Amino acid sequence: MASKQRLNVLVVDRDEVTTLQLKEILAAEDYRVTILAEPGQAGEEVRRNRFQIVILDVTPGPAGGIDALSQIRSADSDLCVIAMTAVPSVEMAVATMKHQAFHYLQKPIDDEELRMVLAEAIREKGLLVDLETRLNSEVGWRIRERRQSRKLTLKQLANRTGLSVSLISQIELGKSAASMSTLHKLATALQVKMTHFFETV
């Protein structure tokens, strides 16, 4: 079996509670995690080390999160940066997007939302080198996209298929590989052919 690439994630935040939460979530997902408490050092940290994802606090204040984002962009224009803030505003969202932030999360961070954003970032940025893992991620994303377009909740899809909510959630997040039987049930419930989940993968 091909080995899975462990992704390096840099978390930049002065809030110890948040960094501990993120480190626990990320470690459980098998990411390598580096914590940086000084946003002003983010640009230099990115220059010195190899990261695939940065999770950066951009909450307004003396910490200077937007300045740190600008420094990161100067160091690496392609790096995936997920911004987070305790004080969300339209102005801050616009500012982060101008610096090509991949996503904008509100603190306190919701574990499941973060996992979904990371899965989306990995898929869109092509960060996975393991074909099996990439396939699971892509199939899961297509199942979730189809379910949401049909305005179905996980529970409703579970009721239609006889599968558990937990299993469907794991498949959608790319953490579990669906068997052919499971995919057939999902395709039938979502009213698509099974090939829908694999086209152009």
Image (spheres, grey):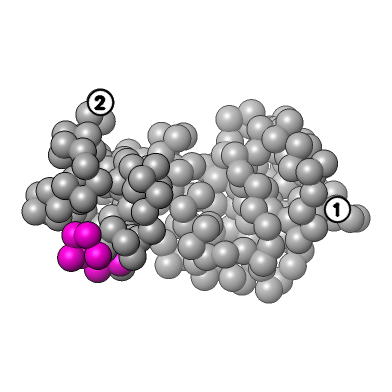
Q: Please indicate whether residue 118 sits to the left or right of residue 62 in the image.
A: left
Question: How many C-alpha atoms fall within 10 Å of the one at disc 1: few (<14), some, or many (≥20)?
Answer: some
The dot on residue 200 is 2
When asked about the image quadrant of residue 93, the answer is top right
Q: Viewer-nearest of labels 1 and 2?
A: 2
Query: Alpha-carbon distance for marks 1 and 2?
Result: 42 Å
Range covered by the magenta-colored residues: 159-165
Residue visible at 22% across and 34% down?
196
Q: Are marks 1 and 2 in contact (CB under 8 Å)?
A: no
- As drawn, the residue found furthest toward the right would be 62
SS for tag 2?
Answer: loop
Q: Position of residue 129 (x, y in %)?
A: 32, 38
SS for tag 1?
Answer: loop
Residue visible at 21% across and 42% down?
191
Q: Where is residue 62 in the image (x, y as percent from the top left)?
A: 90, 55
- As drawn, the residue found furthest toward the left would be 181
Q: Please indicate whether residue 109 sits to the left or right of residue 13 in the image.
A: left
Q: Can residue 189 be seen in this view?
A: yes
Label 1 vs 2, first from the N-terminus? 1
- As drawn, the residue found furthest toward the top would be 200
Residue visible at 59% across and 70% down?
21
Give the residue type that dot 1 points to.
Answer: Pro
Q: Is residue 41 visible?
A: no
Which residue is denoted by mark 1 in the rendering?
A: 60
Quarter placement of the C terminus: top left
Give the residue type that dot 2 points to.
Answer: Thr
Q: Please indicate whether residue 201 sits to the left or right of residue 15 in the image.
A: left
Q: Position of residue 198 (x, y in %)?
A: 21, 34
Q: Position of residue 57 (x, y in %)?
A: 72, 54
